Amino acid sequence: MSPTDPAKLTPATHRGGERTISACHTVPLVGGVVGGWVHEQGQRRESGRCSLVILPTGSRFLRLLLTLLLCCVGVGAAVSSPPNVIFILIDDLGWTDLGCFGSTFYKTPHIDQLAARGMKFTDAYAACPVCSPTRASIMTGKYPARLHLTDWLPGRRDLPAQKLARPRIRQELPLEEIALAEALKARGYATAHIGKWHLGGKGFEPEKQGFDLNVAGDHTGTPLSYFYPFRRDKAAMPRLESSAEREYLTDRLTAEAERFIEQNRNQPFFLYLAHYAVHIPLRAKQEFIDEFLKEAPSRTHTNAIYAAMIASVDESVGRLVRKLDALKLSEHTILCFTSDNGGLSVQEGPNTPATSNAPLRAGKGYLYEGGIRIPLIMHWPGVTKAGAICRTPVSSIDHYPTILEIAGALPVAGQIIDGVSLVPLLRQTGSIRREAIYWHYPHYSNQGGRPGAAIRRGDFKLIEFYEDSRVELYNLAQDQGESNDLAARMPELSRELSQELSNWRRAIDAQRMTPNPEYKSPLLQ
Ligand SMILES: [Ca+2]
């Protein structure tokens, strides 16, 4: 079987022991605001049902039983500490860039082992095809369009060749947002941000969003250096001012993460480890590159430097798992491993393209599947079943409500969360309530992507291009590679999905593009 054969992810080819959850349940939204949940009095409106228990007069036994039950629940909640959460975010890691997601060239034994122990999501999406907006969605549970933070920061400037001008976007994650770390800190968690932030500079650092510790995170989207010393000119990466000779950034961030785990072993902790890898500039340890130069490349994966960067990320995961085992924390720690957008599949700097997302179409910067579908693995000890596979479409907006539910932290009154908790999927006890997943990307990307929007509902995905309002429609169940545009053949469904997309944009106050006054048509140049 080819390494990226779509059949590899179909139920017929699962190895023994893998469990599959049926795909994509769609249940209409009930109540709340369109496209988001409003939380009232710290209760989820959709799940905050109260049951009135009426006992017959004189039913002393039942009353006693109920009292005992409530006491047990109360005592249990009071004495059991919430689980530790480790969220590992890899920058620009593509959907097929792991062994467990189909690559035969990249070697990821530790991540594959994590997938074998936990749940693998085949249809996980980033909320945006580029960095900062997806990161904002993870931190808030909101669509980037609702936050008016729809491009990487500070963003790409408008060019005369571009017909439309971008809207003015927020330059940082607003302080009034209750970031994931803030919500967990309120629940008693020790919190650490280690790695790439890219959600604002001075005054908007991770420390301002609930993180007790920040290592290496600032306004930038690329590291000052992947190797010692972690500085350029007079600038140094936060808390990496001192470093050992030949030190490699992925290894150093891992060491910082190990130290944080060790120091907080006796209390619940939230570790957000956002590696700068595997973003450009492609730089890796030479001994790893040499190893991959000896290996035969696969049909789609050929870049030895990129493979070496992934190998270091894999080592990082292995080290953290070993650290948890050594400290006897494994059974009380949830691990989430994912990416922020698709793999870089075009030329952008030396030694690129980095990867191929085939069989998916295109890559980072595009609303095609290659730009937004990403690996996602979750391991919740005692809950997720070994080797489980979930085919329900999920999004990076879902991490916030999921982690809050697992941690027993409640949203505050009036807080809007677009994502839905994945707990029923992780427990395999039910489906999630959502009609569709949406994207709004009013920007031209560095990789050649055009501004547009997209909606996935069930197996169908519609992409709208803002320059000419053209739409494309695909049936992802039959056409994973988005090569067969059904828009002309299914005009009614196209109209319906376009309308739904438009309603969603209006409901969340998405910013619009405007005609570019500097525009010079290529025909007139
Ligand atoms: Ca990225």
Image: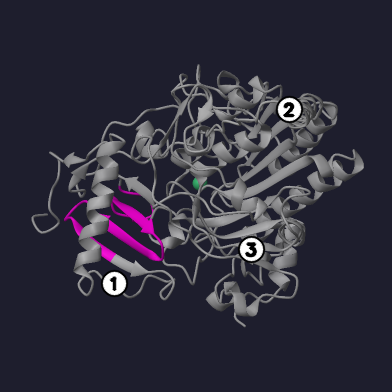
- Residue position for label 3: 389
Is 216 in the magenta? no
Viewer-proximal residue, 32 or 416? 32
| 330 left or right, relative to 66 | right
In primary-sequence order, the first of circles 2 and 1 is: 2
**Residue pictured at 65% horizontal, 49% vertical:** 337
Q: Which residues are magenta?
A: 444-472
| 503 left or right, relative to 83 | left
Mark 2 surroundings: few (<14), some (14-19) or many (≥20) residues within 10 A: some
The reply to whether dot 3 and dot 2 touch (C-beta < 8 Å) is no
The image shows residue 36 at horizontal and vertical percentages of 40, 38
The image shows residue 351 at horizontal and vertical percentages of 54, 59
Viewer-proximal residue, 493 or 271? 493
Q: Report whether the residue tagged 2 is closer than 8 Å to ligand 1.
A: no
Mark 3 surroundings: few (<14), some (14-19) or many (≥20) residues within 10 A: many
As shown in the figure, which amino acid type bears the numbered disc 1?
Asp
Q: Nearer the viewer, mark 3 or mark 1?
A: 3
In primary-sequence order, the first of circles 3 and 1 is: 3
Q: Where, by quadrant of the figure, is residue 449 drawn?
A: bottom left
Asked which secondary structure carries label 2, the reply is helix
Q: Where, by quadrant of the figure, is residue 33 drawn?
A: top left
Identify the image quadrant of the N terminus: bottom right
In primary-sequence order, the first of circles 3 and 2 is: 2
- Residue position for label 1: 485
Q: Up-down: is 372 above or below 201?
A: below
Viewer-proximal residue, 408 or 269? 408
**Residue pictured at 73% horizontal, 27% vertical:** 63
- Residue position for label 2: 63
Inter-mark Cα distance, 3 to 1? 28 Å
Q: Up-down: is 471 above or below 203?
A: below
| 204 left or right, relative to 273 | left
Q: Nearer the viewer, mark 2 or mark 1?
A: 2
